[in-house]
Amino acid sequence: MMPKERILQLRDELNQHNYRYYVLSQPEISDMEYDRLMHELIALEKEHPDLADPASPSQRVGSDTDNTFTQVKHTYPMLSLDNTYSEDEVRDFDERTRKTLYLDKVEYICELKYDGVSISLQYENGRLVRAVTRGDGEKGDDVTPNAKTIRSIPLLLKPGNHPDTFEIRGEIFLPHKGFEAMNAERAETGEPIFANPRNAASGTLKTKNSALVARRPLDCYLYYLPGLEKHFSTHFESIQAAKEWGFKIPPYIKKCSNLDEVFAFIAFWEKERDGLPFDIDGIVIKVNAYRQQQLLGFTAKSPRWAIAYKFKAREAITTLLSVDYQVGRTGAVTPVANLEPVLLAGTRVKRASLHNADQIALLDIHIGDKVTIEKGGEIIPKITGVDLSARSADLKPVRFIEKCPECGTALVRSQGEAKHFCPNETDCPPQIKGRLEHFVSRKAMDIGCAEATIEQLYDHGLLKNAADFYNLTAEQLVKLERFARKSAENLVNSIELSKQVPFDRVLYAIGIRYVGETVAKKLARHFLSMEALRKASVDDLIQVGEIGEVIAQSVIGYFANERNMELINRLVQAGLQMQMMTVETNISSTLHGKNFVISGVFRNHSREDIQQLIASHGGKNQSSVNSNTQYVVAGDGMGPAKREKAAKLGIPVISEDDFMQMISS
Ligand SMILES: [Zn+2]
């Protein structure tokens, strides 16, 4: 098959699978199979840049180049809806509507009000050309590269009778599951966590790096097509057509012929909203007929043909019994209120968040107070108020602790920080365990060691810092409860393998505050070795793009600590990668005269790393398999075309491990 035909075929297949998976939730192939097709497409497009297409499914993986957001004027202003919390105001809305239209009855469409970020998508000849945020309603930010990474947004519409150009609007949101996973990951790297899914979605959509956006499980429901009065007679019809064109249209929609049906819809979802996999904050009621919408028109701020009924925040009143202080993996201290158990939105609540010392002072909260708790978008309820009139004179104010409840060290609070921290990074138990968990995590050293195992090893005194991993033996492990010979050996092997993890990930793994995955990569590429980084001054550090004063001071502070240096020295002795492999460094000539083709995704190294390793051992990299190729190094998702060709020419296909063996011997 010609490359062009294959590319078109892959795009078509991926579009189909994408639609089935993300819009219909009826996948036909496994994730691995999907990734394999995607890798093949990306590889082919790379080999044939003339066949590039901005609507190709390959665009969904995003790009590491920072994009800038230009401001774009909306064709139709993106107005907000009139909001109300009162059923009476919904009745008024209905009465006003019927009066203006001289009708006894008006047909309404009820929909859920998604708690996310509004988006406007523009299509030309069936292709997504632009995605713009609401902004101030008149102008918004062009976030097209980011929107393209959201799998439920079609880049190419199904063939059909869609207008040549049109706009569709909806809401980008983060489902609960994705939100929790994302916060867990951020907590691990010491990044601030998001307060609720809406903040997380809007923060993500404003991220400049679209490859990063692609890794976040954003979703998008579309529910409004402005300006199509010539094509359809009702809102409902337009939405059904959009569904046929391939858009993800919410199934939670109801035609209501009177106000009773509207209220029934409201009552149903007010009760059932907790069962949804995402947040909603109310119901939207729209006049269905376009003709009627036009007669009703707009005020300066909002359409007169729609209203949003917002759910009341779910509140309850209970008594504050005591306050606990939890120390997180980063040393951040969070006050948690213990409450007299109370029912709130269908669940029994006995704990609530108090956020930080400022919040406690602001509420002037006393132990024994009657407090109001509220459940909003957050998973844990929070205390929002105190009933001062119910307070008896003998109650004592909550005093924020001064010492760490885990290790007794005096807490510190830096200027501009909301939270108190335990500064005892090296000896505070939750912080030690947190650092160990971070060290073994997949993006760091990728050691297969579960949280519970770390806990167990720590409790037995076998593991006090990351360097201790490299002293563990299978003999020691089998003596522990729950360790079989096989699992002990697996852990030891996994630790051994981590010695090949490249330097940038080692740098990320040691857990310098503010040095996340991306910063670690930048520092590693700039300084090339731990030794050079250790010697760097603040000035040297801020020379590196995007490294500011705070990160620079944190790096300097890390290396100034003797115990950190001790750890690093032990890691050096253990044989971890403490320098970047670069093309310039010629390590050996083991691979002299040999040509390699690499394909797929590798477990311990990036493609670039492997290419550099080939070069630094005297080998040559080739982009495609031919009769001069000696080896194909294959990772996950190697293209079948390459595999076929290698087989035909009798060229050995080797794994990442085989390759590492080859250069180490
Ligand atoms: Zn502590």
Image (cartoon, grey):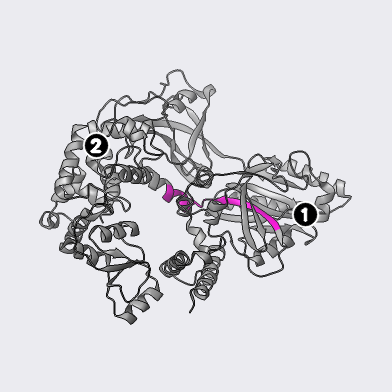
- Residue 258's disc is 1
Q: Quadrant of residue 518?
A: top left
Q: Nearer the viewer, residue 122 or 525?
A: 525
Q: Position of residue 241 (x, y in %)?
A: 70, 65
The answer to whether residue 654 shows anywhere in this view is yes
Name the residue carrying label 2.
534
The part of the chain drawn in magenta is 166-182
- Left or right: 661, with 393 as reference point: left
Identified at 39% across, 44% down, the residue is 186
**CA gap, disc 2 and disc 1:** 72 Å
Q: Residue furthest right?
A: 102
Q: Nearer the viewer, residue 630 or 327?
A: 630
Could you tell me how many numbered marks the image carries? 2
Q: Position of residue 353 (x, y in %)?
A: 44, 36
- Left or right: 37, with 435 as reference point: right
**Three-letter residue code for mark 1:** Asn
- Left or right: 3, with 163 as reference point: left
**Three-letter residue code for mark 2:** Arg
Q: Secondary structure at mark 2?
A: helix
Query: Is-magenta flag for residue 312?
Result: no
The answer to whether residue 462 shows anywhere in this view is no
Q: Position of residue 44 (x, y in %)?
A: 45, 68
Q: Position of residue 389 (x, y in %)?
A: 54, 22
